[in-house]
Image (cartoon, coloured by chain):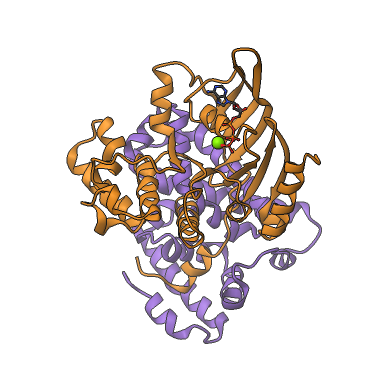
Amino acid sequence: MTSNPLKTMMNNIPVPTSQLIEVIQVKGMTKTFQHESHQVTALQDVNFTIYQGEMVAIMGTSGSGKSTLLQMIGAIDAPTSGQILIRGEQANIYQEPQATLFRRDNIGFVFQSFELLEDLTVADNVAMPLILQDMPHKEIETRVNEVLTQVEMLQWRTHLPAELSGGQQQRVAIARALIARPPILLADEPTGALDFNTTNTILALLQTIQTKKQQTMIIVTHDAYVASYADRVLFFHDGRIVDHYDNERNEYDVGHILEKFKQIARGDV
Amino acid sequence: MIDDIQQAMLGDEEAFQRLITQQHASLYRMIYAYVHNEIDAIEVFQNVVVKAFYALSTLQQPTYFVTWLMRIAINESITFMKKQARESSAPIEQFMHIADHVPSPDENIDLWQALNELNDQYKTVLLLRYYQDYTVVQIAEVTQLPEGTVKTSIRRGLQQLKKRMKGAYYDDFQSFKNHDE
Ligand SMILES: Nc1ncnc2c1ncn2[C@@H]1O[C@H](COP(=O)(O)OP(=O)(O)OP(=O)(O)O)[C@@H](O)[C@H]1O
Ligand SMILES: [Mg+2]
């Protein structure tokens, strides 16, 4: 459609991503693992809410429970106690077949190590979630082209992952995570294996997806710079949320986030 | 989307949420154009969602969903503003100036002000036509006005807007005008 001054002006009205629709509510979530001789408490009474269209960063030292948390939200593993509400409803997502269906319909995953299938082309990697849903070929093709265009990788569609740079592989992985249009995108250290410039392009991509599609996303990172792109940061330590930081109110201050993170790592909490 | 609408009409809350999610930015901005501040816009938005959910079974046909939702949003916004005006001792004009955020002030302040000086009917048809890209038929559905009245309102609304803009953006408005009159 043609643009006009009125439309431009209206599109400039910021839409508050928070407070509108609660997408994920985590309530009293605890997870313990039994090792041979002792128990490890990976998450301890974790509570938080994430709203439609928010980008939330999770920061914390190694072993603080970040990946465990994503696994609970992504229905890969069940918490020891506590519950999770998805769009206000209690989700019974930790038993099969609900878990698989929940993941299929609600979650896109992105990992530090990309996790692309090396024998498949870019297009086939991206198509995989839809192939598993038995979507008709024609529709899959349309969707693959659409999402590869979005991540600016369309011209690479027939290449194999090994022929791509790390940043390009991550773009493909993001396309794969989004192709089924999941309401929630979970990313565990998505820029952990990338250099600074590539990290920037991936962050810019995630931000575009967030604003254009109102995509709700959780990004686990230990990089304060990455966290400064999020709307909010939750700081984890020893399985608990020990602090949080509102970027929207505090002007996306990397230095401040880093300072908080250092304090937490030192144990000053 | 039609699937989701049919499911939502049968009471499927998740399908309904998906529909709201798709419309949420454009609905919110419409509401904001009437109430002029974030706190009220969020409140009205939430009322609209709740109202729509409970009224969904009265929707005649799934294809009307978007315009139907838009009608609820506009009605709720206007009702909200009237109620505020009634409950406040301040004269209505003062509401124009408590806008706590003018979208992108430098370029748009004149247009924003001009739009908000129009009466509700002109403002509504212009927003639907030029922000939502609705056709005259769709605007008639939303506003429940005859199509002829919609056309006239678009034309007169634009004229008034231009007059208030005192020639600013004049070139933009050339292309902005009549792509289906
Ligand atoms: N499958 C498992 N079995 C046993 N213990 C586990 C398992 N998964 C995680 N843990 C333990 O739970 C704790 C939290 O681990 P988690 O992987 O969530 O940390 P993390 O914050 O992601 O750390 P990192 O930054 O190193 O990735 C750790 O003590 C870990 O050893
Ligand atoms: Mg981890």
In terms of image quadrants, where is residue A102?
A: top left
Give the colour in which the image draws chain A. orange
Where residue A4 appears, x then y in whole percent?
A: 43, 72
Tell me if A244 is positioned left or right of B8 in this view. right
Where residue A106 appears, x then y in whole percent?
A: 44, 33
Q: Is residue A59 visible?
A: yes
| Residue at the limit of the structure toward the front, as seen here | A37
| Residue at the limit of the structure toward the bottom, as seen here | B167
Considering the image in quadrants, where does the C terminus of chain A appear?
top right
In terms of image quadrants, where is residue B145?
A: bottom left
Q: Is residue A135 above or below residue B150?
A: above
Considering the image in quadrants, where does the N terminus of chain A appear?
bottom left
Viewer-closest of A26 and B173: A26
Give the chain letter for purple: B
In terms of image quadrants, where is residue B63?
A: top left
Q: Is residue A253 visible?
A: no
| Residue at position x 39%, y 76% in the image | B177
Viewer-closest of A33 and A133: A33
Where residue A258 appears, x then y in whole percent?
A: 69, 53
| Residue at position x 81%, y 58% in the image | B89
Q: Is residue A97 above or below residue A158?
A: above
Q: How many marks?
A: 0
Tell me if B73 is positioned left or right of A170 in this view. right
Viewer-closest of A21 and A60: A60
Where residue B45 appears, x then y in whole percent?
A: 58, 46
Tell me if B180 is positioned left or right of A216 in this view. left
